[in-house]
Amino acid sequence: MNDLSGQGAKPTWSQKAAVSQKGWRFGAVLGVFLVVMAALVWRLVDLQVVDHEFLRQQGDVRTIRVEKIDAHRGVITDRHGEPLAVSAPVQTIWANPSQTDPDEPRLASLARLMGMSEARLRQRLRDYSGREFIYLRRKVQPDLARRIMDLDISGVYSRQEYRRYYPAGEVTAHVVGFTNIDEQGQEGMELSYNEWLSGKPGSKRVLKDNRGRVIKDLALIQDAERGHDLQLSIDLRLQYLAYRELKAMVNAQNARGGTLVMLDVDTGEVLAMVNQGSYNPNDRSQLDPANLRNKAITDLFEPGSTMKPITMAAALESGKYSVGDVVDTNPGYRRFGRFTIRDHRNYGVLSLTDIIVKSSNVGISKIATELGGDAIRDLYSRVGLGEPTGVGFPGEAVGVLPAPPKWHPVDEATLSYGYGMSLNALQLAQAYMVLANGGIKYPLSLLKVDKKPKGHRVLSEHVTAEIRKMLHGVVERGTGTRADPGLYSAGGKTGTVHLVGNQGYEDNQYKGIFAGMAPMDNPRIVTVVAVDAPQSGEYYGGEVAAPVFARVMSDALRLLNVKPELEVSGSHSGSRPTGERG
């Protein structure tokens, strides 16, 4: 019998079971693999075909943002185009506290660059952890912003804004004013013309990375509309010299403050307007609110003897007086019940010209009694007193021009030399502008005038010519000899008044005033100077205000290319008064 073991024998049951198990495992693995592959293929199809648009939109939502484009604020310039207020691009640093770890080590460097306490920075991030936006530092220089962003701190970003700069600083501060940190006008012309200067912001779409940094601009939605420029009537050259001379006098006299206004006689444009004290709009860290006011427009005072030439004009206009008339001022005072009007001394009989030259209260009050209060008030009103100047400056004070139903003799007398009424320095300059240009009242302007404005006559040429001769006499031989500008003839009137406080007139506190014009053959500019509460012992207008007028007018007329009229004598310019005090 043959041995057939190991050849052609049938597999046992255990062998069959092992083979079957291996096949099942292979099939299971293959099936799972095929299912996974099918799922991946389906997901790829779903992502690339079915949900492609939806997913693209969701990605854009997370990376594309709409950003505001700040509008560039308009430039303010002087009449010659010199910049007085400009906006420069800067960066603002902000943070998303929900994205920033308060324990981030690099916050120490960030705090140091921003000049703030590290502990305060970390605490702010903790306090506002639920917010998505806080300012860290507004409007920093671009190079500092780059150094901050180079720290690469999560949740810390920068954006472009604009910052307002004032090249002339405190010299033009009271006219130009300033804006707040959001470039909204707060004072001066910045406030008056805020809407004109502001412009309109725009917007754009930008692509950002996962840290919120802008990668590139994608599309412009609406372009920003730049603000309009504003050209002022101010001549920066005259503004500088006016500020310099006024500040020097205020410091020399240890005065409380001062004001100077200069007008173009033929256009009504304000060529210079300065005050002391002032402030630097570029650095408001030590700002005194009392220095914010443009006192030339917002502060009122009694004009004193500077009103005498206008009262005299009313007398000549009435026909009751002529230049050759005289007035008896003996015995040097007048009594109205308990009230007494006095001159500096008994002048006796005075001509109308000498009443102005010597600044006689008695003489002008006698004329006022003859004229009546209504005639004087009417001319005061016609030259612009008691009404707005029309320059549109915020906070302008109109003043008080009395109009009682019945004039008492003492009221007529005091009105004739500027008491019992109030005005601002710009109104006083406007009144003298009328005397200077032959009797025409032009509208005043803080904006440059392209052509001569239309004015209207309020006084005759003959009357104003006679008054100018009297004003010239004040500077030649009267109370205003220290107002003589040397190479140019000038005329004007001094005034000295008590300052008014909360309790009425302040004892031993005065305002010295000079209002005048030059050159006298054809006046080009009018200037008013007022010095408040000088403390050096000299307080009369002829002593503290007139010298400022002389120096400013001399330099101003040269800058305006006005041909000198006189030889250099040195006998008048800067000398002490030879006449009576004003």
Image: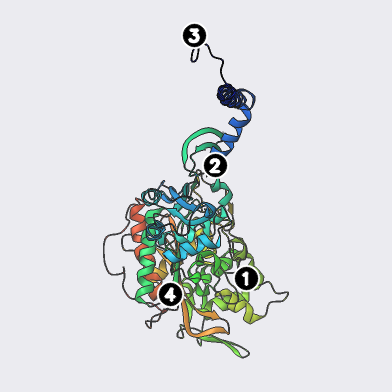
Residue at the extreme bottom: 338
- Quarter-wise, where is residue 494 in the image? bottom left
Q: CA distance from mark 2 to mark 4?
A: 59 Å
Q: Which residue is mark 3?
A: 2
The image shows residue 565 at horizontal and vertical percentages of 33, 56
The earlier-in-sequence mark between 1 and 2 is 2
| SS for callout 3 | loop
Task: Kindly identify the amino acid type of the residue bearing the numbered disc 2.
Answer: Glu
The earlier-in-sequence mark between 3 and 4 is 3
The image shows residue 269 at horizontal and vertical percentages of 49, 53
How packed mark 1 is, by other alpha carbons closer than 10 Å (few <14, some 14-19, many 20 or more), is: some
| SS for callout 4 | helix
Q: Which residue is mark 1?
A: 400
- Answer above or below: position of 355 versus 116: below
Q: CA distance from mark 3 to mark 4?
A: 155 Å
Circles 3 and 4 in contact, beta carbons < 8 Å: no
| The label number, if any, that marks residue 541 in the structure image | 4
- Which is more foreground, mark 3 or mark 2? 3
The earlier-in-sequence mark between 3 and 1 is 3
The earlier-in-sequence mark between 4 and 1 is 1
Q: Nearer the viewer, residue 416 or 291?
A: 291
Circles 1 and 2 in contact, beta carbons < 8 Å: no
Q: Nearer the viewer, residue 296 or 43?
A: 43
Q: CA distance from mark 3 to mark 2?
A: 99 Å
Task: Kindly identify the amino acid type of the residue bearing the numbered disc 3.
Answer: Asn
Q: Nearer the viewer, residue 496 or 70?
A: 70
Circles 3 and 2 in contact, beta carbons < 8 Å: no
| SS for callout 2 | strand
- Would you say 233 lies left or right of 47 here? left
